Image (tube, grey):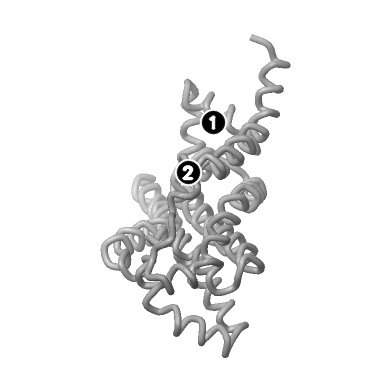
Amino acid sequence: MQGPPQITSRIPGQRRIWLRRVPILALLAAALLGALFFRDALGVEALARHREALLAFRDAHYLASVAAFLAAYVAIVALSLPGGTVATLAGGFLFGLFPGVLLNVTAATSGAVLLFLAARSGLGGSFASRLNRGGGRAAGLIAAIRENEWSVLLMMRLVPAVPFFLANLIPAFTGTRLPTYAATTFLGIIPAAFVFTSVGAGLGEVFAQGGRPDLALIFSPPVLLPLVGLAALAALPMLLRALRKGP
């Protein structure tokens, strides 16, 4: 007599689980569709083709252009669409180094936070809890990351070795707290955003000459070495903490 009520009581719980997974599943589907259909529309060539119309709209409707740019950039990051780098270049092209860099960092952080929340509510929270309960190396790794959250997350943002998409998702699966994630994202992407925004600010002359921006600039020694130095500074507290603990 007690069997059917137990079975029916599980259904609402399972439904809630699937409802929590809807946002991350929708974002993953959007990322796949974006990679298939929007790669060319969000490329440098598209920015070059529409540059005059974009500049004219900015001059006629500055505040509206700022709002539209922020919304588009947030959507690109949150939906993991191709074109994040081009969006950063567009911020510099349309609004100059300042406020372009501020708009770029704000939009990228906002989109990353939305993706983080969707991943954490859908799979990340239960995944981290499951690993912690299971113990072993995975639980130890999560504990180590949590102990050094600021250092680890800043290093992931500062050094362009981890793709931005993965850097947005990994913290959701390790139980990172939202304030720490948002702060390290905002601060960590500033140096690279400054570089690409400055490149974007000079795109008018590049496009006029029929050229393309050099996106490999961030991997050149004058840019990469300072980023590595900042990452080393971010890792210093983690190193000192490990030395204090001893072997």
Amino acid type indicated by mark 2:
Phe
Residue 11 is tagged as none
Q: Which residue is mark 2?
A: 219
State left or right for residue 55 relative to residue 181.
left
Q: Nearer the viewer, residue 153 or 194?
A: 194
SS class, disc 1 = helix
State left or right for residue 245 relative to residue 166.
right
**How far across and how far down the image is residue 90, in percent?**
50, 69
Which quarter of the figure has residue 215?
Answer: bottom left
Q: Residues within 10 Å of mark 2 (few under 14, many from 20)?
A: few
**How far across and how far down the image is residue 79, in percent?**
42, 62
Q: Residue at x 27, y 67 (%)?
A: 37
Reply above or below: 92 against 121.
Answer: below
Q: Residues within 10 Å of mark 1 (few under 14, many from 20)?
A: many
Q: Which residue is mark 1?
A: 142
Q: Is residue 34 visible?
A: yes
